Every structure is written in structure tokens, then in C-alpha cells.
Image (cartoon, rainbow, N blue to C red):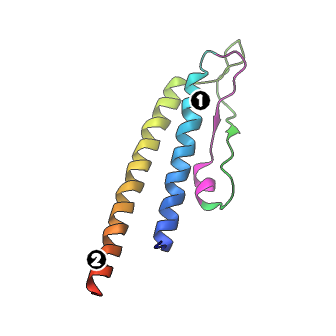
Amino acid sequence: MIETRMLTHLERLLDVTAARQRIVVENIANVDTPGYRTRDLDFRAALSEAGSLNALEVRGLVERPDGNNVDLDREGLLVAANQMQYRLGTQLLRTEFRRILSAIQETR
């Protein structure tokens, strides 16, 4: 396999955005679950760390009387932002593969 520094970074970006998408979808799915606490990733920290992608409770959100603090507006914005980051990552990945292919073709 071909491995470049850029491919490694882009792989991490796609992993982090996929993990964040799963977390946000879980938040939305639990909007009516009493006591459910919103979770999220520290996106920048997750990109820079080589370890696990741990979801942490989001503090400071308005809590309903049943203890749930999921805000559908916040989660919707996160979905949209996350989708843009994922698309950017896939576009950059395509560009990197084209660059690698071009380099291979030039050596022939």
C-alpha cells in the first residue's frame, strides 16, 4: 500500500468525522429519553490524538425537567458542519490520490 503523511492525516479526519456523526445521531435518537445527556467529541483534540475517539458529555446545555439536554438545533448544525468536513476530507483524498497517480505515471 502507498502511505503518505497526507493520506494518514486525511484518514484520521475521515475517522473523526465518522465517529462524530455516530455520536450526533445517537444524541438525536435520544432526544426523548429522560436523563439522556448530550455527548460530543472535542474535534480538534481528536484530530491531533493518535488514540481513541472518546465521546464526552457536553456541559452547559439547557436541561429539561426530565434531565435530558439534547438540543435538536445544535445537533442539526453539527450534522451539517460534520458533513462539510467529511466532504472536504474526501475531496482532499481524491486530490492526493491523483497526485500519487501522476507521480507514478511520470516515472514510467
Q: Which residues are magenta?
A: 33-47
Element assignment for label 1: helix
Q: Amino acid at mark 1?
A: Glu
**How crowded is the residue under tag 2: few (<14 C-alpha within 10 Å), some, or many (20+)?**
few
User: Would you say residue 20 sits in the magenta stretch?
Assistant: no
Which picture quadrant has residue 20?
top right
x and y percent of residue 88 in the render? 38, 53
In this rendering, which labeled residue sits more in front, label 2 or label 1? 2
Which picture quadrant has residue 101?
bottom left
Q: Is residue 50 above or below residue 30?
A: below
Q: 104 or 26, which lies in front?
A: 104
Residue at 46 percent across and 73 percent down: it is 2
x and y percent of residue 1 in the render? 48, 71
Residue at 52 percent across and 24 percent down: it is 72
Residue at 59 percent across and 29 percent down: it is 26
Name, please, the residue furthest toward the top.
Answer: 65
User: Would you say residue 44 sits in the magenta stretch?
Assistant: yes
- Asked whether, in this view, residue 9 is left or right of residue 67, the answer is left
Q: Is residue 95 above or below residue 79?
A: below
Element assignment for label 2: helix
- Asked whether, in this view, residue 62 is left or right of residue 94, the answer is right
Q: Which residue is label 2 attached to?
A: 102
Which picture quadrant has residue 92?
bottom left
Q: Is residue 103 above or below residue 22?
A: below
Q: Which residue is label 1 attached to?
A: 26
Q: Which mark is residue 74?
A: none
Q: Amino acid at mark 2?
A: Ser
Residue at 30 percent across and 87 percent down: it is 107
Question: Marks 2/1: CA distance?
Answer: 41 Å
x and y percent of residue 91 in the render? 34, 57
Compare marks 2 and 1 and give the one earlier in the sequence: 1
